[in-house]
Amino acid sequence: MSDPKIAENSAPVIETTITRAIIEGFSEKLLNHLSLDVAIVGAGPSALVAARYLAKAGLKAAIFERKLAPGGGTWGGGMLFNEVVVQDASLEILDDFGITHKPIASAPGYNTLDSVEMASGLIYGAVHAGAKIFNSVSVEDIVFRDKQVGGLVINWTPVERLGMHVDPLTVTSRCVLDGTGHPSEIMHLAVEKAQLKLSTPTGGILGEKPMWVDSGEASTVENTQEYYPGLFACGMSANNVMGGYRMGPIFGGMLLSGRKAAQLICARLGV
């Protein structure tokens, strides 16, 4: 029979091992991504597509997502019917991620797919290509150096939501991609706090217009661009900045926007 005093004084080996592994693993991951080629804010569909192609091009890219679950507005489909629609033009991207889809017999050129498979497939595809995702991390400011945007100021989302007085940390990057969706949060920081003039007709954020699917799908891709040296926007963030229309649970434009963002950033960085 074992001595209870020995049991009480013995170190909880497996518990300590698990905790140490988590702390060391995360610390190594974060330390390796404090200096990036591309810092992406928001883990919606366009940002995840951009992250995959940036990583495949050999660039160090990381996504900082405020919520616990990456995937943006993809999970719920349309009004919690977990099915979404994409156009034929975006099928090449879905195939690259290994996400299944099927044509709509009554609407040639359009396809449906399971929104849960899409969200999980985009997440896996981005990470598998080499991008990193840091979830439950909020961005509260941007880094501004030498007349260009050069990184992010980050903190834990629970710290932000509880209003705790805890100083943030910084991540530096050669480019920043705003993938925060409808709010365009990073663009607002650039305009309202840094007082930067964006490459829009007014120099500011024009604001998203109501739903017009055809126009919104086209403008999502068209409006994906560099709005200030080092600062790009994709997806609905780009549409909000340039005053495009919203389009609901059709995602082809979002996927194409993410790919275009990656191409523009690669060109900017000479890759």
Image: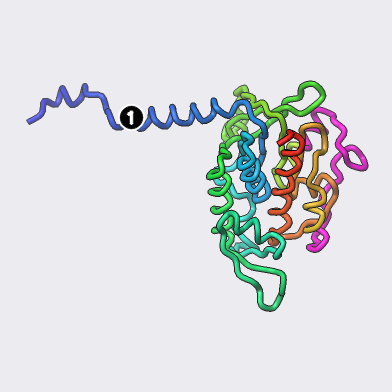
In the picture, residue 241 is in which quadrant? Answer: top right
Side (left or right) of 117 relative to 5 = right
Residue 182 showing in the rendered view: no
Number of numbered discs visible in the structure rendering: 1
Side (left or right) of 127 relative to 206 = left
The quadrant the C terminus occupies is top right
Residue 176's spot in the image, x, y percent?
Answer: 71, 34
Q: Residue drawn 87% across and 33% down? A: 197
Report helix, strand or loop for mark 1: helix
Q: Is residue 65 above or below residue 4?
A: below
Q: Which residues are magenta?
A: 187-216
Residue matched to label 1: 17
Q: Is residue 209 magenta?
A: yes
Q: Residue drawn 74% across and 48% down? A: 260
Instruction: Give the crowd class for mark 1: few <14, some 14-19, many >=20 residues within 10 Å.
Output: few
Q: Who is closer to the viewer here, 49 or 202?
A: 49
The residue at the far left in this view is 1
Residue 69 showing in the rendered view: yes
The quadrant the N terminus occupies is top left
Q: Residue drawn 45% across and 30% down? A: 25
Side (left or right) of 182 relative to 1 = right
The residue at the far front in this view is 271
Amino acid type, residue under disc 1 in the picture: Thr
Q: Who is closer to the viewer here, 218 or 115?
A: 218
Side (left or right) of 85 relative to 135 = right
Q: Is residue 47 above or below residue 198?
A: below
Residue 5's spot in the image, x, y percent?
Answer: 15, 22
Q: Is residue 111 magenta?
A: no
Residue 218's spot in the image, x, y percent?
Answer: 80, 57
Residue 168's spot in the image, x, y percent?
Answer: 62, 24
Q: Residue drawn 27% across and 28% down? A: 13
